[in-house]
Image (tube, rainbow, N blue to C red):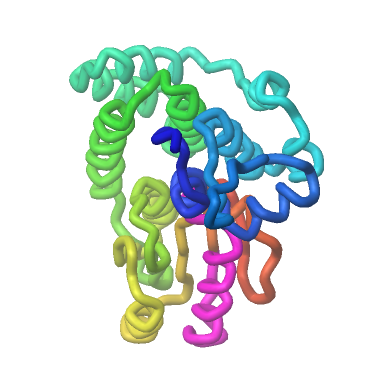
Amino acid sequence: MDTALVSIGEVAEATGLSPEVIRVWERRYGFPVPVRLPSGHRRYRAEDLRRLRWLSLALARGKRPSQVVPMPLPSLRTLLDTTESAPVAEILEAVRALDGEEIRRRLHEAWQRHGLMPFLCEVVGPLLERVGTLWVDDVLQIEHEHLLTELLEDLLRALRTGFQPKPEVPVVALATLPGERHRLGLLMAALAYAAKGARVEVLGTDLPLATLAAAVRGMGAATLGISVSLAGGGEGARRLLQDLRERIPKGVRLVVGGQGAARMRRLDGIYLTRGLELV
């Protein structure tokens, strides 16, 4: 057997697409076409995995499966390709070189030049999207992503310390769902809320639902923000959110953001946003 072949579970982990979605696409659109083992299990080629990663990015940008799944990879890449702004291009140049000091300098320059919310929405957001596409194309590796993530987290935390909460503004709790370990979306939301004078409590990543619900009740939070990454979206996250909505008090506003939120169907009592517009 070709050792480059991967299982449907490994594809799901690498793309954030559930095995159910992958099987539906196979039946409905004729892609992907898996290699069938004598046992009947599906295995997927490296080129299938790459195209599925691009499709996952397309869904996160609001594209419909019927529009993008039948597309060949070159057309899909053209559809999703975006022009890098000057600040993003400069930061990416430093990321490619693994130059931590230059990344720090460029990030600080972009923040000072743009101001807080434009920095988050027009620099950090597009930067992370571009890193995602470059990772899919194997231009950037895991070490590039990790270095940038650590430096961004340091900056976002440092900036948040410059804001003092207003006494009359209620508590905002921020967390991720069980199994979700991506923290950057949380820290971006925390900074945006803090800039508006909210008392922000970051509960962290990968929390059990019972823990989240107990914390919300214990601190009297008026809003619970959940960050869902591209890999963490889909029906599994949707079911967890439905469960969470039932566990927390009805008066608590449940806001779900991040790239993974764009792939979810609407849920009663839950505000879905890809960006920071609901902050």
Give coordinates of residue 200: x percent, y percent: 34, 63
Q: Residue at horizontal 41%, vertical 22%?
A: 113
**170 to the left or right of 59:** left
Give coordinates of residue 134: x percent, y percent: 46, 23
| Residue 109 visible within the image | yes
Give coordinates of residue 22: x percent, y percent: 64, 51
**210 to the left or right of 268:** left
Q: Is residue 275 magenta?
A: no
Q: Is residue 246 magenta?
A: yes
Residue 19, located in which quarter of the rendered image? bottom right
In the image, the segment drawn in magenta is 229-255
Front-lying residue, 139 or 267: 139
Quadrant containing the N terminus is top left
- Up-down: is 28 above or below 86? below
Give coordinates of residue 230: x percent, y percent: 51, 47
- Up-down: is 67 above or below 113? below
Q: Residue at horizontal 33%, vertical 80%?
A: 211
Residue 24, located in which quarter of the rendered image? bottom right
